[in-house]
Amino acid sequence: MERIRRIPIIVWFLVGALVILGVGIWFFTTNSALTGSDKKNPDDPIPVSRDVPGTKYFKIVGRTHIASGVPGTGYISNPPTSGNHWASPAKNGIYDKQLPDEQIIHDLEHGYVWISYVPKAKGEATPGAKVKDGVSDEVVKKLKEIVEGDNWKVILEPRANDDAPIVLVAWGRLLNLETPDYNKIKDFIKTYRDRGPEKTPE
């Protein structure tokens, strides 16, 4: 007991500091080891409480900017749900001509919903079309009405090489519609809009 009393106070402070330091190092290294492989990728889509039935998830393949006019590569879905893209996004709204995928991917990154449809062939078959018959003028009109009524972070355009007559895309997500389902389209917009990795006000 007398020996313990003779130990200088500074030694006790050093011992205490070493213990606290050791516990801190153990905590942080253990925590990193347990969660390192489980850490969420910040580029992943923001989760939702309920998915729209039929929606597919795709791995995020990047969000690198490439020069405008340069074709993007490495996409794993049609249309792309992520990947390298041009630095200038498109404005929201309705387009009567197809925009470059590389431009709209930037919009997806900002949380946009991209609605595209296979246009009805006029005369000869539409070049690149995978779907035999495009959607009718009546369906296009209804799609435009939906977007006109709720156009915040929504883009509508014709896209001849879609795999289905109507395709809905958000960051990392895709839904093919073989027949028009306007309630599902509205639900997709409300569910997945503004869930990209970049929050923007526009």
Image (cartoon, grey):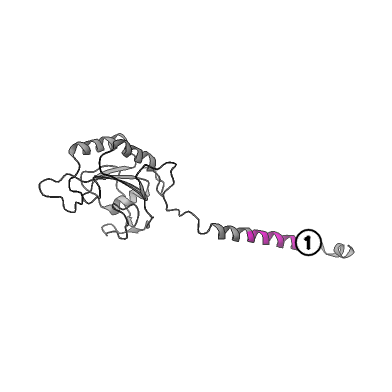
Tally of numbered discs: 1
User: How crowded is the residue under tag 1: few (<14 C-alpha within 10 Å), some, or many (20+)?
Assistant: few
Q: Which residue is painted at 26% across and 45% down in the image?
A: 116
Q: Main secondary structure of the magenta part?
A: helix
State the image quarter where residue 74 is shown: bottom left
Query: Which quadrant holds the N terminus?
Result: bottom right
Residue sitting farthest toward the left: 123
Q: Which residue is mark 1?
A: 12
Q: Which element carries disc 1, helix, strand or loop?
A: helix
In the displayed structure, 59 sits above or below 117; it is: below
Residue 177 % position (x, y): 28, 43
x%, y% of residue 54?
Answer: 34, 45
Residue 96: percent from the left, percent from the top?
Answer: 21, 43
Question: Viewed as shown, does residue 41 lie left or right of 67?
Answer: right
Residue stretch rendered in magenta on the structure: 15-26
What quarter of the picture does the C terminus occupy?
Answer: top left
Q: Amino acid at mark 1?
A: Trp
